[in-house]
Amino acid sequence: LNAKRFYGFELELVVEDYKKMILASTCIDTRAGSELYMNSDGSIHAHNENGETFGGGGSGFELISHPMTLGYIKASQKLDDVFYVLQDLRARSLQNSSTGLHVHISRNGFKDTNTMTRFHGFFYAHHNAHFIEQMAGRTRNGYQRSDQITPPSNFNGGTRYEIINYQNDHTVEVRLFKGAVGKNWLLEKIEFLDCLIEFSQTERALTVEELE
């Protein structure tokens, strides 16, 4: 594991009403205040894959982490506790079409610009599109487009609502994943990104055909 590579995540969630959102906030602060915090998000609504609102719309929020290494995420009992609380409150993410999981990766976690070029190229290669969609757990939408085939100059700037967002000074944000209320889902996505970065440090680009 790379001790210099840090991850942060933003998990978009919906609970039934405002009272449950306040209860979730209190539990998160009590059990994992040093690792996680939450922000309410009025743009997140409870609706199904057909865009139909259900359950009165619910209350949307983001569960946001401080930077952590992959090893720390795996070992964190506080993360386990928080997901148990969210499950008890019947928080939704996977079953809701407007929620997702965004993962930030520290720029220092990439060996060099060649690594970033190969990493970027994997997500935008047309022959990897089906695999990426399966890994993401959802199809493309307006919040994670695939138009930025060539990365912006020096991997800075560009468009925010892309598969990869390069607008942050210290992190690269991968925006493509569907959200889910569970640590296993989170780990699966971060471990995938970590393995892809490691492979991108080799001399050849990775394609799905090489994984099969």
Image (tube, rainbow, N blue to C red):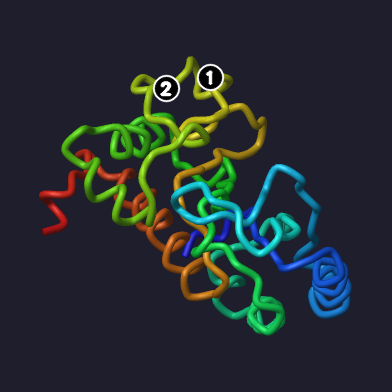
Residue 77 in percent (x, y) is at 67, 84
Q: Quadrant of residue 114?
A: top left
The amino acid pointed to by label 2 is Pro
Residue 79 in percent (x, y) is at 66, 76
Q: Is residue 26 above or below residue 208?
A: below
Q: Which residue occupies the foreground of this view, 9 or 100? A: 100
Q: Quadrant of residue 191?
A: bottom left
Residue 30 in percent (x, y) is at 88, 78
Tell me what residue is drawn at x 57 percent, y 71 percent: 181
Q: Which residue occupies the foreground of this view, 182 or 119? A: 182
Q: Secondary structure at mark 1?
A: loop
Residue position marked by numbered label 1 in the rendering: 158
Q: Is residue 16 above or below residue 120?
A: below
How many C-alpha atoms fall within 10 Å of the one at disc 1: few (<14), some, or many (≥20)? some
Q: Does residue 37 appear anywhere in the picture?
A: yes
Q: Tell whether 179 sits left or right of 63.
A: left
Q: Are marks 2 and 1 in contact (CB under 8 Å)?
A: yes
Residue 101 in percent (x, y) is at 55, 54
How many C-alpha atoms fall within 10 Å of the one at disc 2: few (<14), some, or many (≥20)? some
Tell me what residue is drawn at x 22 percent, y 46 percent: 130
If the image is split into quadrants, where does the C terminus sit?
A: bottom left
Q: Tell whether 176 sits left or right of 6.
A: left
Cα gap from disc 2 to disc 1, whole angstroms = 7 Å
Count every numbered label the image shows and give the total. Answer: 2
Residue position marked by numbered label 2 in the rendering: 151
